[in-house]
Amino acid sequence: MEDRRQRLRSLLTVDGDSGSSALARICALAVSELAVTGAGVTLIRRPDGAGGQLLAWASDPVATRLEDLQLTVGEGPGLAAATSDAPVLVPALAAAQARWPAFTAGALAVGAAAMFAFPLVLGAIRLGSLDCYRTTPGQLSPDQVSDALVLAEAAFAAVLAAVAGHAPDDLGWISDVHAEVHQACGMVMYQLKITMEAALLRIRAHAYAHDLPIGVVAAQIVNRQLSLDAGQ
C-alpha cells in the first residue's frame, strides 16, 4: 500500500503541465489509474450537506453534468459519500434507482453506468468527495479502490492547502462552475424573502420539473429571463 501511495504521489508531482491545478491532476490520475471514464471533485458547504455543493473540478462535460444533477436533485453517490464518511461504490447505476430515483434516472440518461465516490474527510472535517464514473457497469478492483482512497487524501490535502486562512466551512474561495447558482439563490432569497436554503430548493424544483440543468435555470434567473414567484 505504501509503495502505491508513493507511486501516486510521484505521479501527482510530474503529471500534467505546470499550470494545471492539483485537483485537475488528481482527476486526470483518477481517470488513468482507476480505469474510469471521468472524475470530479465536489465540495460541500456544511458538514451535513444541507448548505449546497460546489464543483471544484470536473474532467469532462459528463462529469460536470453528474455533479450538476446531484446539486439539482439533492441526492447521489457523491453527497452520500461526503455525509457518511465512507466510499460509495455503485458498479451498476441501473440497480440504484430505489436509493436515488431522481439522480439515477438523470445519470443513466447522460451515459453513466457506474459511479464511485470517495469522501474528502479527516476526523470531524468533511470537505466533499472525489466522484468517478464509467460508461459501462463494473466493479473497481481492490487495488483501484486503494488508489482512489490515496487520491481522495491528496484532494483533501489540496483543498486544505488552498483553504489556509479561511474557516473550514468557508468555500467561497473556490472557483466554482456553479457560481451562478449561488448568485441566483441570492436573488431569489431577496425577491421572495426566504432563506438561501429555501431559495436553492425552489431553483432545484424548477430545474427538475422542467428537466433542465440547474446551471441553465440559474443563468435564466441571473439574466432576468426567469422569475420564480411564490407559487413556483
Image (tube, rainbow, N blue to C red):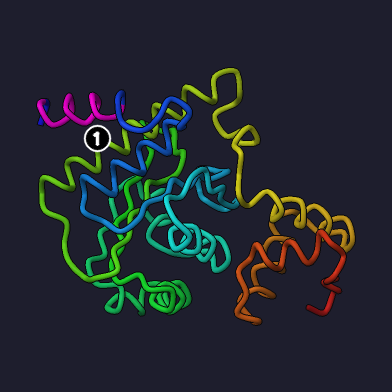
Left or right: 121 as drawn, with respect to 210: left
Which residue appears at 19% of the width and 40% of the height?
A: 147
Query: In terms of secondary structure, what is the magenta stretch mainly?
Result: helix
Q: Residues within 10 Å of mark 1 (few under 14, many from 20)?
A: many
User: Residue 126 is drawn in which quadrant?
Assistant: top left
* 168 relative to 178, above or below: above
Q: Answer yes or no: is residue 83 visible.
A: no
Percent coordinates x, y for residue 82 in the rendering: 41, 48
Q: Which residue is rendered at x = 48% and y = 60% of the image? A: 61
Residue 147 appears in view: yes
Report the quarter where the C terminus lies.
bottom right
The question of residue 40 being in magenta is answered with: no
Spot the residue most to the top. 165
Region in magenta? 3-12
Q: Residue at x 38, y 39 (%)?
A: 120
Q: Which residue is mark 1?
A: 150
* Disc 1, SS: helix
Q: Quadrant of residue 100?
A: bottom left
Q: Is 31 above or below relative to 221?
A: above
Residue 121: image x %, image y %?
37, 37
Q: Position of 97 compared to 180: left or right?
A: left
Q: Work out whether 221 lies above or below 24.
A: below
Q: Position of residue 25 (x, y in %)?
A: 37, 36
